[in-house]
Image (cartoon, rainbow, N blue to C red):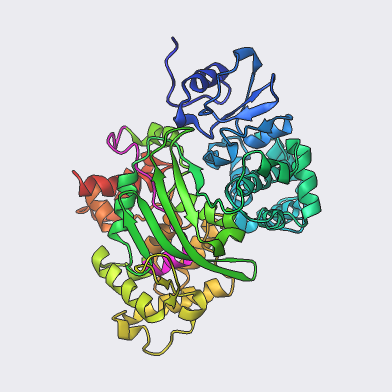
Amino acid sequence: MRPMPAHLPADDDDARYLALKARDARFDGRFFTGVTSTGIYCRPVCAVRTPRRENCRFFTLAAQAESAGFRPCLRCRPELAPQALAWSVQDASGILVRQALRLLDAPEAWSTDGGGALVAQLAHRLGVSDRHLRRIFEAALGVSPLQYLQTRRLLAAKQLLTDTRLPVTQVALASGFASVRRFNAAFSTHYGLNPTQLRREGGAHPGAARPVHLGLRPPYDAAALLGFLATRQIHGMESVDPQGLRRTVRLAVGDVQYTGWIDARFDRKDQPGPRVALTASDSLLPTLPQVIARVRALLDLDADPAAINAVLHPAFPLGDGLRVPGCFDGFELAVRAVLGQQITVAAARTLVQRLLERFGEPIATPWPGLRLLFPAPATLAAAEGDALGQLGIVRQRQAAIVALARAVLDGRIALHAGSDVEATTAALRQLPGIGDWTAQYIAMRALRWPDAFPAGDVALHKALGVRGAPQPARAALEAAQAWRPWRSYGVIRAWAALSNP
């Protein structure tokens, strides 16, 4: 039998069929199989009987399968699969396509003003014409930006219909549709049944609150990621244990602020594929697509270990399952990064704890230990005088926190995965008290940039053996060139190797 490759060539359908027969979770979300005899497309981990090879058509994206007329499987549920990596696009216009995908994958950017308007805004933001964006997008991916966006919205809606009790009207709005009529028409056209029928055929029933399941690709070192977060957890706001994490959260959708809590557990069930079970408070259900996207980023569920390990395994043979811990809220992460500059993790945690106790907002949760929300940007933007100094925060950090809060509040800086990395890191470095280390750390964890590199990090210098060099930051940059474009993952592996030689 032909051996299973660790990394599938884009056009190797025979290798894809082998992965399909093996139900190999490493390839979950990296391709989908359309079955011509049924008109349905599935994930590689689908538990149904493997179709005949001649009946299989393979697609890199769910949008491609739907554009070809296939409907999503109700059993393996393609909406649960990890997202395909934007970084895999390598054609001449790859940078532009990657930027477009980052924006289209962010539910925060999904407009209810119609897909065409959003694509026009996207083209304007990228500095190209609508026509040029459509041309290079279709050349690289085989679907238009609008088709890709429509599939993302419909699959998000399918997940809400299946796993929540939200009324169809709220499902439509949460998925980015301007009206229920438009949502019903799109859903019926693509899936051959209306939203109410889907819910009757196996979705959520009244009174049946169920966790939302989020797929991931193995290998995945959950213990290492949870350990990283546990070392930095802030009591009253976060609780991390060996099975998962709970925390209070705040997020804005347009002009509306939502607050609540989340509980993410690594599910022991392995069919269809390894996954995380996410439960959110009822107050967050109207914005569940945004919550899901943020939890996926927090736990780095969309990473492609095969692509990353192809570059990093020779240097870090024991780190194949390590992920880059993200964050739920970019502003919170940035404030914590500022407070962590040039001090130990324990000392930084003490300062963040004091900040939370002084400025945090009370919230009710099912757990007495979770009782506070991290301060909102408006709160810290107004924290002048000695309010921060009384917490033991030095004057330079005080100025940085206030300036950062005001920049986020004014919309001059956006700290999420859809942000322009180069422009955002440059804007961060312009703020008082924020240098390149902090900007790169924020890019790594909040902007989800896989090639961020805090060259001035002292622990990284030690791990790379350049601590005694005349210019250690430059020496670190040179030593890490072989890690590109996955230097963020290289940093995590270097830190882990330093902690566990």
Residue in the picture at 76% in, 57% down: 178
Residue 177 in view (yes/no): yes
Residue 316 drawn above or below residue 343: above
**What count of labels does the image hold?**
0
Determine the main secondary structure of the stretch shown in magenta.
loop
Q: Position of residue 500 (x, y in %)?
A: 20, 45
Q: In which quadrant will I find the C terminus? A: top left
Q: In which quadrant will I find the N terminus? A: top left
Displayed quadrant of residue 117: bottom right
Q: Which residue lies most toward the front here?
A: 207
Q: Which residue lies most toward the top here?
A: 1
Residue 498 drawn above or below residue 320: below
Is 406 situated left or right of 326 in this image? right
Magenta stretch: includes residue 345: no
Magenta region, residue range: 314-336
Residue 485 in view (yes/no): no
Towards the viewer: 171 or 13: 171
Q: Position of residue 390 (x, y in %)?
A: 31, 86
Q: Position of residue 100 (x, y in %)?
A: 63, 48
Towards the viewer: 27 or 446: 27
Residue in the picture at 46% in, 37% down: 304
Magenta stretch: includes residue 332: yes
Q: Position of residue 40 (x, y in %)?
A: 67, 28
Residue 272 drawn above or below residue 323: above
Towards the viewer: 348 or 214: 214
Residue in the picture at 62% in, 34% down: 74
Residue 397 drawn above or below residue 153: below
